Image (cartoon, helix red, strand yellow):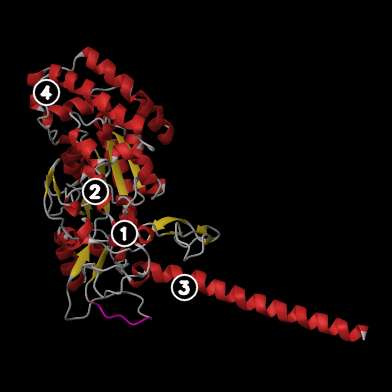
Amino acid sequence: MALLNLIRLKLMQAVGVVVVGIALLGLLILIFQTPSQLLRASSSDSLHKAVGDPPPMAATLPPDLASDLFVDVDDGSAGNMLSYRNSSSFLTSIFLGKSRAVCVGSNETLGEVEDLLCLPKPSYDPRLKNPCWWENITQTSNAKVPAPPASVSSLSCLPYFHILCCSKSGTTDMYRRISMHPDLVPNFGSFGKERLWWSWYKYGYIGRRTKSTPKPFDSYIRGFRVLALYLEKAQAEKRQKELKRLITLDGSPLDMWDLRGWTQLPQNRNLRQPAVLTPHLMRHLYRDPKFLILARDPVERLYTAYLFHGMGNSAQEFHEDVEEGIAMFSDCLASAQDRIECFVNASVLESMPVDLHFSCYAVYFEEWLKVFPKKHFLFLRTEDYSNDMRNSLYKIFDFLEMSRPSSQDMKKMLSAPISYHTQRKDVAGPMLNETRAMLREWFKPWNQELAHLMKNKAYLWKDADIDT
């Protein structure tokens, strides 16, 4: 009898193990199917199909839940965490990586713009250095290289790199010099470099305050048609070297800091602080982006930009507007739950008499570094770029994995005149000493934070007054 009872006990334990095993198998299926379904929520066959109603999974959730649905994923690495926030319908923590939003679907009645997270990531052609893909291709599952059928010759491209940061820091000058490299192809934007889509046109902004109709992702891609045409021809004529060399860029500096359109993103619905910003959207669509950041002493940059953009005409006006701007922004910071609320608040930024906010570079750098590792960035100071242009250009070309220019091309780059000189500054005269002292004090903690972030005391800016 004792032996029989022992056998029964062992059988019950075995059954229990099987049941637990089946439950774990079901859990694993849920874990590894649900994220992939969410991340592929758009069933559109075309990258540029306009997004209307939310995808089925988001549609089953209340709006306040759907807008706060986030998945943590990691680009291939194991042992990280995956979590669905604010949703009792999903497991709260599973294995995978960094916080990434998923497709929700835009609601035009709420003033939301196209949900880029509902677009599938393009099938980039690995033969091209620049991130480009062929449109309307039917591929078999075992196709190793996405090549266009003979009847199709439509190539779409995103920029290989971005130039970011701030006006009156020398970004146009830097672009005009590096654009002399034979492998860099301009875009259809202002000066051949500025598309202004990620910060302005996507949200319907045209400048500081003017609003218009938001432009879709299609319109952004069309701006890089120049490179696409070059590459289509090179592909047709089998000029393989050009396919691996030619690149284009988006040189819109304000894409780094002008993030006020965040409230129009579906993933930020009903949120006080943004969960998704420009870098999150780029990460969803881009292959391996690079970012050049040129930052100038914030005090001198602010005065030059103030005069250049016609915000005032004299050193005295600037002094008065700085006093008012510091008071306004300090009030915002004092009442905010998190400082980011002030730095992306449209009503605050549009009413500021001076653009103090985007000279606090560390705040924006941190937001970008939350999404992209530091290897994606090359940080340069305007002062260093101006004082040692040759080596700065070498650093840029090395970072972009471009060939170093010939001695003749480099001579042309170095001998080119400075792109801009702010003549209004000649009329207004130098900044008042008391204004400079006030701004040095205001920017001191922000510069200290930046120097710590960059691990470089040069970002304390105890030097330089570059005239741009």
Ranked by sequence position, the earlier of labels 1 and 4 is 1
x%, y% of residue 86?
Answer: 44, 57
Residue receiving disc 3: 33
> What's drawn in magenta, residue-wise?
137-141
Per the model, the C-alpha gap separating discs 2 and 3 is 33 Å
Q: Residue furthest front?
A: 62
Taking depth in this image into account, of 242 and 338 the one nearest to the observer is 338
Viewer-side residue, 325 vs 417: 325
Question: In whole angstroms, how far apart are the C-alphas of marks 1 and 3?
Answer: 23 Å
| Mark 4–mark 3 CB contact (< 8 Å) | no
Q: Which numbered disc, 4 or 2, marks the residue that appears first in the sequence? A: 2
| Residue 138 sits inside the magenta stretch | yes
Residue at which label 4 appears = 425
Which amino acid lies under the numbered mark 1 shown in the image of this protein?
Answer: Tyr
Residue appearing at x 15%, y 54% in the figure: 187
Q: Is residue 116 magenta?
A: no
Question: Which circle, 2 or 1, is nearer the viewer?
Answer: 2
Outermost right residue:
1
Work out whether 61 lies above or below 193. below
Q: CA distance from mark 2 to mark 1?
A: 20 Å
Mark 4 or 3 closer to N-term?
Answer: 3
